[in-house]
Image (cartoon, helix red, strand yellow):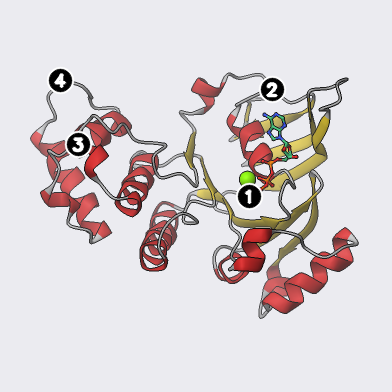
Amino acid sequence: MLNISHISKTFNPGTVNEKKAITDLSLHLKPGDFVTIIGSNGAGKSTLFNAVAGSFLTDSGSIVLDGKDVTFMPEFKRARMIGRLFQDPMRGSAPGMTIEENLALAAGSGGWFSHVSPADKKRFRDRLALLDMGLEERMKQPVGLLSGGQRQALTLLMATMNPPKLLLLDEHTAALDPGTAEKVLKLTRDIVAEHKITTMMVTHNMNQALELGNRTLMMDSGNIVLDIKGKEREGLTVKDLLLKFKAGAGKNLDNDRILLS
Ligand SMILES: Nc1ncnc2c1ncn2[C@@H]1O[C@H](COP(=O)(O)OP(=O)(O)OP(=O)(O)O)[C@@H](O)[C@H]1O
Ligand SMILES: [Mg+2]
């Protein structure tokens, strides 16, 4: 489903600010894999997502998504295959447009000033009701009026309205209060399972990393230092994970958000 072969990315090469963010990283995901990713600050987790989404071209290596070589494909074209959520709930939806218009845009059935069909309205209302946040009664309101959690939940619906080939979640619940984060996480789990979406989720919550999905990657210094799945992953505790990280990376996991959570 996703085949990343030997990609590397150096920012500001040849300058004092040179930074090797990804070094010879390879990863193969099967259809329906739900991979959680944990790592030190600056390990290259977001950079890996940027590389896959096409925010920049990698210096070397190749990326094949759903049988298509996307290595040199521009970001806007990859966006048709990839759904993406960021930590910041303000990204991913248009604040001046209503909930209904945002959903219509995501569904590819309209947007500004265009007519939203009754069938689409019904479909949007049903999806919104799943969030259990009362948003189905607020479809004519601008998204800018929603809380961060409501907006993130809406972005998740939008990103999966037409199920993408790949869903990239970059600490998408980190900025939410614990109750809302739990809701958005449950929704994530349900939507991913319903459509069997191949998913990569960065989290700083070690319990989440072990509970969700079928595979856990740990990253450090621009590479994957641990890839845990199958029998090895069953029954693994956070303590085991930290020990494995230390063995794999040769040092303790150093991430302020993990340590604070
Ligand atoms: N556009 C850029 N220009 C220059 N350096 C960058 C750029 N993007 C990322 N970096 C650097 O690459 C390294 C990896 O950054 P990245 O954001 O991928 O880390 P991360 O694993 O997502 O960390 P965090 O847990 O803090 O989010 C960091 O040293 C970062 O400063
Ligand atoms: Mg990051």
Marks 1/2: CA–CA distance: 23 Å
Specify which label sits upstream in the sequence, 4 or 1.
1
The percent position of residue 50, horizontal first and vertical second, equals 62, 34
Say which of marks 4 and 1 sits in front. 4
From this viewpoint, which residue is outermost toward the left? 118
Between circles 1 and 3, the one closer to the viewer is 3
Residue type at the position of mark 4? Phe
Q: What element carries label 3?
A: loop
Q: Residue 213: x percent and y percent? A: 56, 62
Left or right: 55 in relation to 103: right
Residue underneath mark 4: 113
> Depth check: 162 or 114 in front?
114
Which one is closest to the eye, mark 1 or mark 2? 2
Q: Residue at x 58, y 68 (%)?
A: 261
Residue 69 higher or lower than 92, as above or below:
above
Q: Which secondary structure lies at badge 2? A: loop
Q: Report the disc number at residue 142.
A: 3
Residue corresponding to mark 2: 57
Q: Position of residue 221 (x, y in %)?
A: 82, 47
* Disc on res. 30: 1
- Are the residues tagged 1 and 3 within 8 Å (C-beta)? no
Q: Which amino acid does label 3 sit on?
A: Pro
